[in-house]
Image: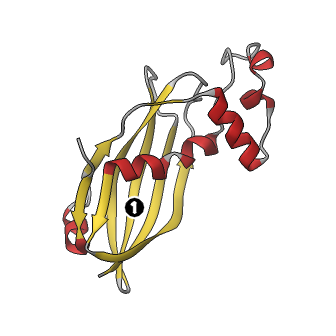
Amino acid sequence: MGATVINGLDDLKRRAGQELGVSDWLEVTQEAIDAFADATGDHQWIHVDPERAKETPFGGTIAHGLYTLSLGPQFSYSLFEVTGVAFGLNYGYNKVRYPAPLPVGSKVRMRATLTAVDDIPGGVQLTVTQTFEREGGDKPVCVAESVSRVYGG
């Protein structure tokens, strides 16, 4: 199934409150976590030392919370596309929470809901609730309110 195409500001407004889709599963590998640690300088052992992490209640390494959050754009691009506008910008996040750990070796996906569409000068501000789910998990590993601004075409 392809990405949902949203055409223009009026279509965005009509879709407020709707789920935009659920991404495919992505396996979280130690290699990806190590690369994220190298890119960010966050080499905390719970993420990068599998031997030491075996002794924790998690039984192994877990993904950085910010690694999980950083998957948002990748998953969003696979779920929806906004056409008929001049451009859009990432405006930030209202709230981010990590209710459960994301163990290395597990699979994660994202559910996107267009929570709000508010008028701003020249366009709209979108709030998309990004809910990251772990395969077999009983609660989300991350819930984030992503805020973007889209300007008319």
Percent x, y for residue 62? 65, 28
Q: Please determine whether, in this image, residue 50 is positioned above or below residue 39.
A: above
Does 116 appear above or below 56? below
User: Which quarter of the picture shows residue 148?
Assistant: bottom left
In which quadrant is the C terminus drawn?
Answer: bottom left
In the shown orientation, is residue 64 left or right of residue 93?
A: right
Where residue 34 sits, quadrant-wise, is top right
Question: What residue is rendered at 75% in x and 29% in y?
Answer: 48
Report if residue 151 is visible in the image: yes
The image shows residue 116, relative to residue 131, as above or below, that is below
Residue in the image at 40% along x and 61% along y: 127
The residue positioned 73% from the left and 41% from the top of the image is: 37
Residue in the foreground of this view, choosing between 10 and 49 = 49
Foreground residue, 60 or 29?
A: 29
Q: Residues within 10 Å of mark 1 (few under 14, many from 20)?
A: many
- Looking at the figure, which quarter contains the N terminus? top left
Numbered disc 1: secondary structure: strand
Task: Indicate the position of residue 80 as horizontal and vertical percent values.
Answer: 31, 54
| Colour basis | secondary structure
Percent from the top left, x then y, of residue 129? 40, 51
Q: Which residue is at a point 24% across and 62% down the rendered structure image?
A: 6
Q: Which residue is mark 1?
A: 127
